[in-house]
Image: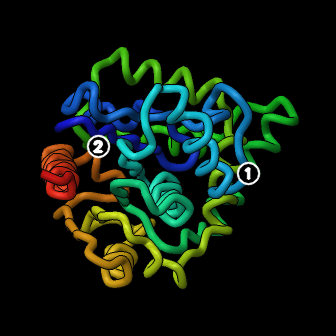
Amino acid sequence: MGGLKVILVPGSGSTSETFWHQEHAFPGVVSAVSLPGHPDGQVRETIPEYVRWLHDEYVPSQGWRHEDVIVGGNSLGAGISLAYGLAYPEVPGLISLGGGARLRVLFSTLARIRRQLAAIGSGQPLPEQAQAAQDDGAGRPQPPEDVRQRQAEKRARMGPYPGLNDYLACDRFDIMNRLHEITAPTLIVVGTNDTQTPVLYSQYLHEKIPGSRLVVVEGAGHGGHGERPDVVNAAIAEFVASVEAKRAAAVPA
């Protein structure tokens, strides 16, 4: 994969370990990031703030050039990647995994996390439902035990606040009327069983973003990158190769 780097940003309240399958498949190319406050540092309250953190802090900290970095992500991370494309149109490519132009969150989800916060504030243990909600690996190809342990430790250190913050950031996100402004090549991936950001969300992205490519993953849910890494990784590899080819063609002979 040439000289391009691919940053992948996880969904609400999650960590970089969620993209182990992608980092493992593309070592030195894919860089999965844990957002500020997940668990280290200070959370940002809005998607535009996360975008600025990526551009102004994370990319320079890695020693990369902005023109060499494709930005992608899942759910919240997909929203961040699309917003990145609007803020920095020179980005060479964008990847939306289970994303949408608007990311409204169910009231029941927000209420559940608020109950977790209240329980922690009163010194009570987390409700069993909340603990079960943190186990999202059932039926998926599993990363090695040390990776899962590291992810569990990070989630334990985070607590529920970053997740609530991220869901609120998603709930305020709406770029439906600006998608046509995205000029970077864009890969859009969605699972047929995604109930949080259904297929029609990605179809809308595909219709409105000029020249975008849509890949629908049969049988996958909201975390298709972990459920069907074979399909998702192949789509990412093909997309990065196409961006590389476009860049090479643009270089004067």
Q: Helix, strand or loop at disc 1? A: loop
Q: Which residue is mark 1?
A: 45
Can you name the residue that lies furthest to the right here?
122
**Where does residue 19 sit, x and y in percent of width and height?**
35, 37
Q: Earlier in the sequence, mark 2 or mark 1?
A: 1
Q: CA distance from mark 2 to mark 1?
A: 27 Å
Q: Residue at x 35, y 51 (%)?
A: 223
Give coordinates of residue 86: x percent, y percent: 52, 66
Q: In this figure, which residue is indicated by the disc labeled 2?
A: 226
Could you say which is closer to the camera, residue 192 or residue 176? Answer: 176
Q: Position of residue 13 (x, y in %)?
A: 58, 43
Colour style of the rendered protein structure:
rainbow
Q: Residue furthest top?
A: 146
User: Hey, which quadrant is residue 142 in on the image?
Assistant: top left
Viewer-proximal residue, 163 or 240? 240
Task: Return the residue nearer the eye: 139 or 220.
Answer: 220
Give, as a three-letter code, the residue at label 1.
Glu
Q: Is residue 48 left or right of residue 15?
A: right
Q: Where is residue 91 drawn, in percent x and y?
A: 41, 54
Residue appearing at x 54%, y 26% in the figure: 61
The residue that appears at 69% across and 56% down in the rendered structure is 46
